[in-house]
Amino acid sequence: MLIDMDTVTIIRVQWGWGCAAPLYISSSLAWLCYPQSQTHHLPSPNRATEVEGRFFQDSSPSREPSLPMAEHGALLLLLLMALAVTMAPPSAAFLVQPQPNLLTYHNGAVLSGDIPVSILWYGRFTPAQKAVVSDFLLSLSAPPRGAPSSSPSPSVAQWWSSINRLYLSKAAAVSKNGANGAGARNARVVLAGQVSDEACSLGKNLKMSQLPALAAAARPAKAGGIALVLTAQDVAVEGFCASRCGHHGSYGGGAGSSSRAAYAWVGNPAAQCPGQCAWPFHQPTYGPQAPPLVPPSGDAGMDGAVISVASMVAGAVTNPFGDGFYQGDRAAPLEAATACAGVYASGAYPGYAGRLLVDAATGASYNAHGARGRKYLLPALFDPDTSACSTLV
């Protein structure tokens, strides 16, 4: 094992006496503990004596170690530590094991039962563009039990059933012990209504703080529903493209209030960032420039928007108020779909969406059948039981 002394970092921890003990050694770094609690970067062995002067402890103030002695002592110490670690069992090299950061239930509210979704079309959308999204929402609900399925397999309804199986059923089970998911049951999305604001009443440069007002204008049918705001391709929203393709949150009353409501926003990325928010139907902004896939609807921007709508609706149902199912920082969580960003089928890896189905007539790539003969590309959903992304194909 070679240790580059130009990159040695010394961590000093309060031990109460003048010895050095190894915490961890990799092939390029040595971590040492010393009798204080500061960190120094030592660019060379010579500076070790200048900064620390404590590689050797001596009770006599008149006996200072010479520079060569300190230098040789440091080298000898590091070599002995390297030898000890290489001879020790693997577990000895890692004294502190980080806890995995899993996507878990935080005992908060989830949406379940009939979930009315009201749409606000902000800006100009064609009837064909509106139909792409509205047909997707209609596709989420499975037909009544005993009725024949209107969509072949794999279907959008099957994708949504994974939300019920992987998330809402767990919230219902935990609620028996007093969690806020009490009464959670299967979620059935219902398209409640659509409102248009073609004149862009709040302008075409929106702040995130304005989204709740637009959500309220969507006139959601009742508490427990979702107001879905879709902005046209010429409407700029704060953070759109730079850090997000969509967003979901809540508005109305405070925590625990019955008037609190969930909303989601998604922008049409066709003109602003198709390489970021319409991939894989457009070449990516960064990375290998593989040919884009053919969008099922023929509109790359709207098919990309459907991917974001699916992700945001899944997040709004499983984590509507920030205390449901999520992983990581509550302020910037990974959720049911966003934890699997870029994964659409088996075999996916960064820059490759996976082994998708291809329409023989149009060449379009998809992974789910929807209502009215539609085909959609939907994101994989994170499975908390296996800590893996679950795909339809």
Image: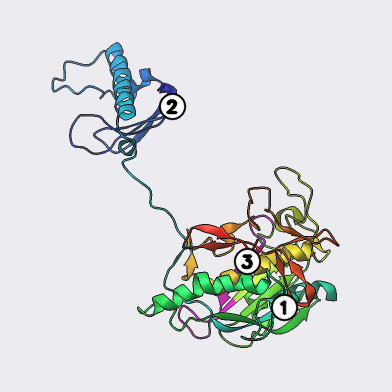
Apparent side of residue 159 relative to residue 356 in the rendered image (left or right) = left
First of labels 1, 2 by sequence position:
2
Residue at (48% x, 60% y) in the render = 327
The disc labelled 3 sits on which kind of residue? Ser
Residue 248 image point, x, y percent = 60, 70
Which quarter of the rendering shows the C terminus?
Answer: bottom right
Magenta stretch encompasses residue 279 = no
Residue 312 image point, x, y percent = 62, 68
Q: Main secondary structure of the magenta part?
A: loop
Q: Give the crowd class for mark 2: few <14, some 14-19, many >=20 residues within 10 Å.
A: some
- Picture disc at residue 29: none
Magenta-highlighted residues: 241-262
Which quarter of the rendering shows the N terminus?
Answer: top left
Q: Which residue is mark 3?
A: 311
Distance from disc 3 to disc 1, alpha carbons, whole Å, reads 18 Å
Disc 3 on helix, strand or loop? helix
Q: Nearer the viewer, residue 336 or 207?
A: 336
Q: Which residue is mark 1?
A: 120
Residue at (69% x, 57% y) in the render = 241
Distance from disc 3 to disc 2, alpha carbons, whole Å, reads 43 Å
Distance from disc 1 to disc 2, alpha carbons, whole Å, reads 56 Å
Apparent side of residue 164 relative to residue 20 in the rendered image (left or right) = right
Q: Give the crowd class for mark 3: few <14, some 14-19, many >=20 residues within 10 Å.
A: many
Residue furthest to the left in view is 59
The disc labelled 2 sits on which kind of residue? Thr
First of labels 3, 2 by sequence position:
2
Residue 22 image point, x, y percent = 29, 32
Residue 360 image point, x, y percent = 83, 60
Disc 1 on helix, strand or loop? strand
